[in-house]
Image (tube, rainbow, N blue to C red):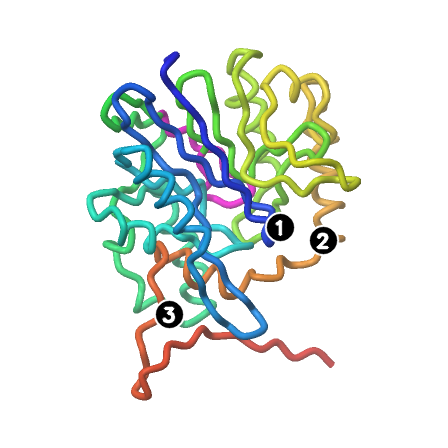
Amino acid sequence: MDNLNVETFFDEQTYTLTYIVYDKVTKDAVIIDPVLDYDQASSTITTESVKKIAIYVKERGLKPHYILESHAHADHLTGALKLKSFFPDVKVAINKNIKIVQEVFGTKFNILKEIKLEDFDTFLNEDELLVAGSIEVKAVFTPGHTPACTSFIIGNNVFTGDALFMPDYGTGRCDFPGGDANALYDSITKKLYTLPDETNVYTGHDYQPGGRELKYKSTIGENRKSNVHLSADTSREEYVKFRTSRDKTLAAPKLLLPSIQVNIRGGHMPAPQDNGVRYLQMPLTFKD
């Protein structure tokens, strides 16, 4: 698909990449992993990041068909619902296994009764082909980071979310509820690494290790050769031991609690209480 263009937006606060993939001729487009700005200290939501995407889409006359969520993110609030307010016909799509994540976290936050099927428009099946005008998107389930992670193959490109990062940063963590290092090993080695070496890999985050400049695009071949966590030569035992050990040292994402509550509902916020204010819930854990 020579007419494809990939436009990138980087959120410096959460190190998140949002992508707009569009056909330069037909103007058909999909948007991957949009971000809603959230200031934790004041619990204030703003929409600068979403507006940048909306302006880009409108100025170029693009026709967005889908907002694709690679998973229910734990480090930023999704901008999908706000973005949909600019483009009412766009559909929000996510892995059908989001229902597993909704059950776990809906119970944890005691909000299961508030979660509705219509919080998302489209639930993706394994290897499902989405047609967005002239653009075809293949949904490849890549669980491990969460049970509901999806990578999206569009032309000669794969958008890997939190499964596979840049070669110098490695792979996603697997210590969230439902995470599984064995599953991520299979997702990468049996699915992503079977793609042609020249396939472009667009990652969901870049944490700029060592303070290097922003990088978000590599290839399958580069990762197979030199990914610091999982190359083609890494055994399952080596990877699982490494991933499990490393994950024990990682702190929880700063925006984990607010992000999950919003993202398992596709960006829908809690209903206002009788004082007209919406509240996110923060469960307390007591340790002696």
Query: What is the CA distance from the residue labelled 1 to the residue labelled 2?
Result: 9 Å
Mark sitting on residue 111: 3
Kindly identify the residue that appears in the image at 55 percent across and 25 percent down: 201
Are discs 1 and 2 less than 8 Å apart at CB? Answer: yes
175, 47: nearer the viewer: 47
Kindly identify the residue that appears in the image at 51 percent across and 55 percent down: 76
Hey, what amino acid is under mark 1? Asp
Residue 123 on image: x %, y %: 29, 42
Name the outermost residue toward the front.
59
Mark sitting on residue 250: 2
Residue 246 lies in the magenta-colored region: no
In the rendered structure, the answer to whether residue 67 lies left or right of residue 240 reads left
The boundaries of the magenta stretch are: 138-150
Which residue is tagged 1? 175
Hey, what amino acid is under mark 2? Leu
SS under mark 2: loop
Asked which quadrant contains residue 130, the reply is top left
Residue 145 lies in the magenta-colored region: yes
**75 versus 219 height, above or below:** below
Q: Residues within 10 Å of mark 3 (few under 14, many from 20)?
A: some
Q: Which of marks 2 and 3 precedes in the sequence?
A: 3
For the N terminus, the image quarter is top left
Asked which quadrant contains residue 22, the reply is top left
Hey, what amino acid is under mark 3? Ile
